[in-house]
Every structure is written in structure tokens, then in C-alpha cells.
Amino acid sequence: MTDRSSAPQRPQSGAGLAVWLDYLEALHPVEIDMGLDRVLLVLQKLFPRRPRPRVITVAGTNGKGSTAACIEALLLDAGRKVGVYSSPHLLKYNERVRLNGRDACDADLVAAFERVEAARGSVSLTYFEFGTLAAFAAMAAAGMEDWVLEVGLGGRLDAVNVWDADLAIITSIDLDHTAWLGDNREDIGFEKAGILRVGKPAIYGELNPPKSVMQQVAAQRIPLRRLGEHYRLEQSGDRVIYLSDEPVAAVSVEGSPLPAASLGMAVEAARLLLPGMSEERIAQVLAAVSLPGRFQTLSQQPLVIADVGHNPHAAHWLAGRLQGAAVKGATRVVYAALEDKDVTGVVAAMAPATNHWYLAGLDVPRGLAVEVLKTRAGLEPDALTGCYASVSQAIEAALADMAPDDRLLIFGSFFTVAAAQTYFLKTR
């Protein structure tokens, strides 16, 4: 991490992406600084004449990335020019900005960074704010017709919320990032409902939304499409069936590794954004969508799965997915987490679906050392197989213990999955 205590030097002409990213890290005194004032000041200079893309904003505790990826695939299949902004990345910063289905190249990102730097003047921007504005610049320069924007933290005060959403999607609401968003679903729901706009359609992707969300829906006269009220989902094996009576529709998606809730929201979005797309085509497109780090198979023999899930809500889904695809042998787990996560809640949610745990430390900002992780996890001695300084060491130990019918899950954060991807790229 770059030292933030001294004023950074602006990258010289011709500087590469790595130099710019170091500059972004050093530009603002703190990593997270909630608020839209700084971003709005620069946005007005960056876009004296605002582009007019169709904006789809996706907020939620879990499921944002998979929902955005599904919507991206549907829009691209319909021939639309689509830009996607998401965070964080796994291996390369370029993953955060996608232009027509491809990660932005270094040159596109550097050009966008240069535009933001020229526009910001003396305004200090966080790493995320600078990158968000650069994503807007890159998508505008590439002529993207649809902008799919994934909220980084919360919604109301997140940098992507400077754009009015033509369609707002709230995937789920549960406890996470409580230091910034609140320690209960009502407060968190209020923050995420900040992406709603008066009279504009919205989708809510789970049952029992907080009252704070429904109050905003009513106050802003939002035409809301809601799971359990306007559509429903049924699951049978690896098949997810979307059903709606308003108007009548049935879409059956088979073999997708993504959460059923994300598939359902994507179908709803397609029906709003692409009314001419057939149910059969929607099903075909969604069945082909996958996303790195979301129940991603890294190896078939032995079976190794990676997932970025990092809170109890995600862990419950993961446990259900593991139980729904039982194996003859044991389920081994490599787990590493960040310091602000509910480790106890995650372990409790995963316990019914797992047998042997290999805990690992994360040597990254806010990463938990393995000794602290062990204390928080509170695993029984027969469940805790070992503790390791790094994810790669834990993976090696787990693989050495695996029987032919066992499977290995590696999860806990984006950093955990990135380390796992790097390990298997080097060794397989």
C-alpha cells in the first residue's frame, strides 16, 4: 500500500496503469470517505454535457456481481453496447470496467484517469471515487448505450449514485460493513434504497424487505417488482424456474452456478429493458453466464470450488449449495477473512455443510492474522484441521489430505479467492 502521508506526484505523460493506481492509492488521506460532494464537483467538470446512457444501478449485501453479469449478458445478446462497472477486482484492476463484454485495456483506463485528473483540480478523491469517475469516462468514450453500475458500499452515498438510475436493483439486505451502514437491516436498507429515483422502476430480489425500503418505495412512487409478490422462483436440482403472473411468464434456467435470486432479478430486468426478448432466449443466455469467484470450479480432479462469500448471508447460501450437491467424501474448507467480518456467524452458517477446516491468514490491509481468525472462529478441535500463515499454504495442506471423493471449498473474501486463483494458475 502506498504511503498516504505525503503529497503524491502526478504521473507523467506516458505513465502506465500501475503508476496511476499507485497514485490513486496515495491521493486521499483515508480509504473510505462516504459522501457525494467531491464526486459531484468533478463530475460536473468531467461531463459539461451529460451523456444519456440507460443506467442500471445494482445495490445489495450479496449478489450484486452475479446479477450485473447476468444483465450484461442479456443486453449484449440483444445487440446493445454495454459498459459495466464493478468492484473489487480479483487479479487485475481492468476487471472493474467492462466494455462490450471485455475488460478495459490499460490504454483505455489510463486515458480515463488522465481525464479525471484534468477535471478534478484541487478536489481530493478516494481510490474508489477516482476509479468510479474514470469508469464513467471510459464508458462514455466508448459510446456505451447501457451502463450497469455496481454499488461499492451502501448506495445512498456511494460514488455510482451520482447518476440517476433508469432501473434500480436491490439484491439483498443483511448485516455487512456495519461500521459505515449501520448494525441492523432497517438502517442498511435505508442506505441501499438511496439508489431509488422518483417514479423509476426497481427490482427487489428477496422476500421480506425492510420497512425502510418499502417506505422509500411508497414515498417516491416506485413501480417495484418484488420477489414473492410479482414473481417467484422454484428450484429443482440445478434448474431454476422463474414464474410470473403479471404478465404470465415462465423461464427455466438449467445448470447455472449463480444464485437463483440473481437469475430471477436478471429475468425481471430483461422483461423491463428488453421486452422483445423471448423466454427461451433469456433462458439460453442466463444458462451460459458464469462469474469468476462465484461458486467457481478451479479444479475437477480433485474437486475445488472458490467463492467470494464473506458474510453470514452469503455463507448460508454457500452451505445450501454444498448440501444440494452432496459428495461421497468429506467437504474440506480453506477460510481466510478480513477483520471487519462476522467470522463467528460465517462459521456457524457453514458448519452443517463442512467437515474439516484449514484456516489461513491474509497479509493484506484489514486482513486477519490466522491466530485472530482461529479465536473468532471458535471451531471444535475435531473440525479444525490446521492453521496456516497464507492461503496457498492452507491449500497445499488441504490438497495433501484429500481423498478421491472429497471436495475443497476456498472462500472468505475476494483476497482469498484471488490467492486461490493465483495458486491454481501456477500449479495446474
Image (cartoon, rainbow, N blue to C red):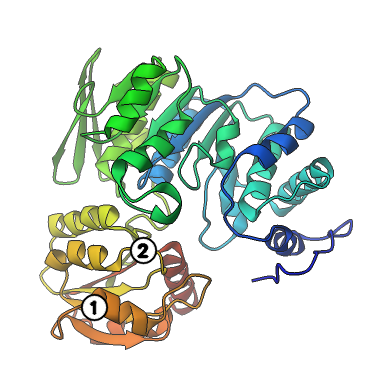
Query: Residue, x 65% and y 49% (percent of image)?
Result: 131
Name the element at disc 2.
Answer: loop
> Disc 2 to disc 1, how far (Cα)?
18 Å
Residue 341 got which mark? 2
Query: Residue, x 24% and y 29% (percent of image)?
Result: 227
Name the element at disc 1.
Answer: strand
222 or 85, which is in the foreground? 222
Q: Quadrant of the N terminus?
A: bottom right
Query: Residue, x 50% and y 47% (percent of image)?
Result: 152
**Number of numbered discs overlaid on the protein picture:** 2
Residue on which disc 1 sits: 357
Which of marks 1 and 2 precedes in the sequence?
Answer: 2
Location of residue 375 by image quarter: bottom left
Looking at the picture, does residue 426 appear above or below residue 418?
below
Crowd band around label 2 with a 10 angstrom C-alpha radius: few (<14), some (14–19), many (20+): many
Residues at circles 2 and 1 in contact by the CB criterion of under 8 Å:
no
Q: Position of residue 143 (x, y in %)?
A: 68, 29
Task: Name the residue type under label 2.
Answer: Lys
Q: Quadrant of the C terminus?
A: bottom left
Query: Residue, x 53% and y 57% (percent of image)?
Result: 89
Mark nearest the camera among 2 and 1 is 2
- 123 left or right of 77 in image: right
Location of residue 351 by image quarter: bottom left
Crowd band around label 1 with a 10 angstrom C-alpha radius: few (<14), some (14–19), many (20+): many
Q: Position of residue 401 (x, y in %)?
A: 23, 86
Looking at the picture, does residue 408 appear above or below residue 273?
below
Q: Position of residue 340 (x, y in %)?
A: 40, 64
125 or 329, which is in the foreground? 125
The answer to whether residue 54 of the structure is visible from this angle is yes
The answer to whether residue 282 of the structure is visible from this angle is no
263 or 339, which is in the foreground? 339
299 or 387, which is in the foreground? 387
